[in-house]
Image: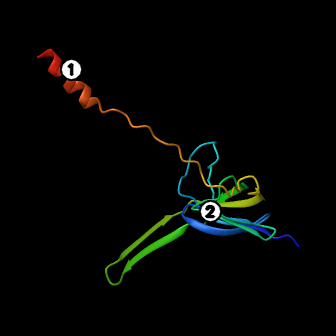
Amino acid sequence: MSEKYAVIRISGHQYLVREGDVLDITTTKVVEGEEPVKVEAEVLLVNDDGKIEVGTPTVAGVKVEFEIENEFNDKIHVRRYKSKSRYRRKKGFKYPMQRIKIVSIGSAKSSVSKSKPKVEKVEKVEKASTKATASKKETK
């Protein structure tokens, strides 16, 4: 049985997800209007048939695709009351929440490379201040 799962980070929270999972997440950015809110997921770990890839801090080349099903949340009521003084206040607010469904988890086979990254040598650049001082001496 092939087990494929990933650990992703969305809005500062980490989730262990598999294909077909449904998550309720709190979004940090709310965009009013017709455009849907786009939430970026950082992939921190991927397990693809027993091959575990751990990112430093993220796994390169792996994408978790998901669909935003709907935005929802219940209103939270805040009530204040002081006895014997006829003081009563009621306020309410909603957290921006979204329900997302994980469609697919991309593979990390193309991103795996065992070789060390190439380091290019940087050539020394002459200081501009030495040229400027040389030109000042010539003018005097």
The residue pinned by badge 1 equals 135
Crowdedness of circle 2 by 10 Å Cα count: few (<14), some, many (20+)? few
How many numbered discs sit on the rendered protein?
Answer: 2
Going from N to C along the chain, the mark reached first, 2 or 1, is: 2
8 or 103: which is nearer to us?
8
95 or 85: which is nearer to us?
95
Q: Nearer the viewer, mark 2 or mark 1?
A: 1
Would you say 71 lies left or right of 92 here? right
Query: Which residue is farthest left?
Result: 140
Q: Write the residue at 63% across / 57% down.
A: 41
Quadrant including the C terminus: top left
Pinpoint residue 31: horizontal percent, then vertical percent: 56, 47
- The three-letter code of the residue at mark 1 reads Ser
Pinpoint residue 102: horizontal percent, then vertical percent: 75, 60
- The three-letter code of the residue at mark 2 reads Gly
Query: Which residue is farthest right?
Result: 1
Pinpoint residue 53: horizontal percent, then vertical percent: 69, 65
Is 34 situated above or below 47?
Answer: above
84 or 31: which is nearer to us?
31
Pinpoint residue 6: horizontal percent, then vertical percent: 71, 66
28 or 12: which is nearer to us?
12
> In the rendered image, which quarter is residue 71 located in?
bottom right
- Numbered disc 2: secondary structure: loop
Q: Write the residue at 68% across / 58% down.
A: 114
Point out which mark residue 44 bears. Answer: none
- Numbered disc 1: secondary structure: helix
Is 2 situated above or below 68?
Answer: below
The residue pinned by badge 2 equals 55
Q: CA distance from mark 2 to mark 1?
A: 53 Å
Would you say 127 lies left or right of 80 here? left
Q: Write the residue at 71% across / 57% down.
A: 112
